[in-house]
Image (cartoon, grey):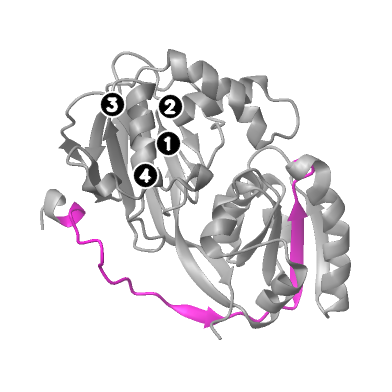
Amino acid sequence: MSTRRRLAQPCDRRVSRKVYRAVVRRVLVIFNPISGGGRAAAASVGVERALSEAGFVVCRVATEPGPSEAWLDGPLAGHDALVVMGGDGAVRAAALSASRVGVPLCNLPFGTENLFARHFGMSRDVPALIDRLKRGRVRRVDLGTVEGEPFLAMCGIGLDAEVVHELARARVGAITKLSYARPILRQVFAWRAPLLRIELDGALWPLPGPGFLVIANTSCYAARIDLASRSIDDDGLLDVCFFPCASSIGAAWWVTQCWLRRQTRAKSFMHQRAQRVVVSRDDGPVRYQMDGDRPRAPQDAVVVTVEVRPKAVPILVKSEK
């Protein structure tokens, strides 16, 4: 089967999905010290107590900067479940360790957008967490990587990435949704869409001109504006969505269409699926963001490789009643 035919699969394709019962006794709770302005750290004490009273053996660890293998793989070994108290950045950091060690994770969201928690129906409700640990099921989902760094929801190349990079340069401590106001306002006037070159599984994807790109593993995006509404989290493929435009005016039009769930009706909307996506440009660096975070990788790369690891991350999902 050719690359183009394989990528253009129907949206209602069936996915072989295996779910098995979780047997959880030992739980590792990790918390991001700055998530929610420190609320995650304070709440982790109560969560540890509640889980202990529910009969679990609990260990609590703070997240650290840098690769998770340096601070999480060791403590995670020997546990049956991982509870991540933080936002999408903390979940991203934990995902690689959960994949390597084979321990299912779930999330008590304390971030800004909490895309992972929204996608999997997770909340801060501790009784619901206890029920998930006692009666939940394990489902494996795909993991996206950009130059080796993980993402679970999406990678964005365009206006969103410029906003994330600008915010990261000025960031001091925790952020809120209001923190995005100034970077968004600046980029609305300054941003010009890049002219990208995209290869999907080794085949060139012809583009009509400049625009912005979303490479998605799930359908969730910031502010509930889900740009990749067709994405499936365990199909072994990344959904590649290109939105042709020249400036923030065109980007705003696309955002409106996505908010109305009408982007797929637009003739200029471009969508494919692939396991490996290579993005490059000749006139500047390829700036990207992953689940709302700026990468640790060098910021001046002119070629970026995005790949999927099929069913790499075990997720603790709620029991089907």
The mark lying in front, picked from 4 and 3, is 4
- Residue 136, placed above or below residue 171: below
Q: Alpha-carbon neighbours of circle 2 within 10 Å: few (<14), some, or many (≥20)?
A: many
Eye-nearest disc, 1 or 2: 2
Residue span colored magenta = 6-34
Amino acid beneath label 1: Gly
Label 2 vs label 4: CA separation? 15 Å
Q: Secondary structure at mark 4?
A: helix
Q: Using the rendered view, name the quadrant where residue 106 is placed.
A: bottom right
* Element at label 2: helix
Numbered badge on residue 258: 4
Of labels 2 and 4, the one closer to you:
4
| Residue at 39% over, 48% down | 216
Question: Mark 1 falls on what kind of element?
Answer: strand
The location of residue 277, given as percent across then percent down, is 30, 41
Q: Which residue is mark 2?
A: 159
C-alpha span from label 3 to label 1: 15 Å
Q: Which mark is residue 156?
A: 1
Disc 4 marks a residue whose amino acid type is: Cys
Q: Amino acid at mark 3?
A: Cys
Residue holding disc 3: 245
Three-letter amino acid code at the position of disc 2: Leu
